[in-house]
Image: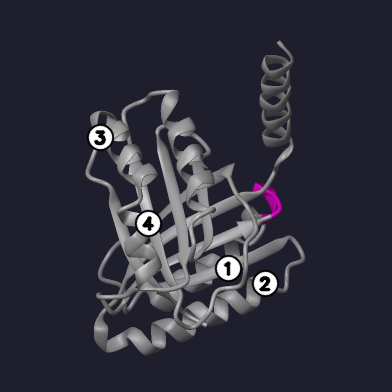
Amino acid sequence: MKRVLFVLLAALLAVRASAQDTTFYSVSYIEVKPSLRASSINALKQYRDLVHRDTANISVGLFEQADRAGHFAIIETWKTAAAYDANAAERKQLEGALEPARTSGWDTRPYKTLSIASGPEATNSSVYVISHVDVSPDPKIAGMLTALAEASRHEQGNIRFDVLLHTMRSNHFEVIEIWQNQKALENHASAAHTKKYRDDIQPSLGSPLDERIYKSIE
């Protein structure tokens, strides 16, 4: 009985903490012409440096797909959604700067915290994996992803394993992983809990897992 009460209390505290967490995330994807890659990176860096002056901005991560030059992901973390909205002019400026270079539309999606934990600093050899998970509505999926994140954080070579939940669509998630090196990522892919997660989630997938490897833009 005591263990049941403890589990229920822990779950209640987790729900309450989640309700109080106002952190807002924006995940954007944009593709540009390879010939204009360098100028596009400069524009992205200028945007990052500009908005990071705002005390409400926690971070702006810039990433380029490891095997596709000019395919970028921008992950912004803000204290609140209102703070993010207040910087709309700066984002409009970035969009204008990249307009001559872009070969795709802007794909920007809003997220909130599902499972986040602090970890060690990434290094030059770190491997970044950003995945979009699109499933049919099922309340069990959030628990699957949370369990995967918690198990993965205990793996040797894991630096971060964060899961974000779309603010308006409970069946869309973003998974952000950082591994010390390629070998650590390969070990994770063959881990028992990873295989179980993939087997369990397969019937609910609305599309194949969109898992891409990136490198950080410093």
Instruction: Name the amino acid, label 4.
Output: His
Answer whether residue 54 is magenta in the image: no
Q: Please provide the residue range marked out in magenta.
A: 79-83
Q: Position of residue 35 (x, y in %)?
A: 26, 88
Label 3 and label 1: CA atoms lie apart by: 32 Å
Please tell me which of labels 1 and 2 falls first in the chain.
2
Q: Position of residue 80 (x, y in %)?
A: 69, 49
Q: Are marks 1 and 2 in contact (CB under 8 Å)?
A: yes
Q: Is 180 placed left or right of 82 in the picture? A: left
Q: Nearer the viewer, residue 214 or 194?
A: 194
Determine the secondary structure under disc 3: helix
- Residue 129 figure quarter: bottom left
Q: Nearer the viewer, mark 1 or mark 4?
A: 4
Label 3 and label 2: CA atoms lie apart by: 39 Å
Q: Residue at x 69, y 63 (%)?
A: 57
Instruction: Name the amino acid, label 1.
Output: Val
Q: Is residue 169 visible?
A: no
Q: Residue at x 40, y 39 (%)?
A: 172
Label 3 and label 4: CA atoms lie apart by: 18 Å
Q: Are marks 3 and 2 in contact (CB under 8 Å)?
A: no
Please tell me which of labels 2 and 4 falls first in the chain.
2
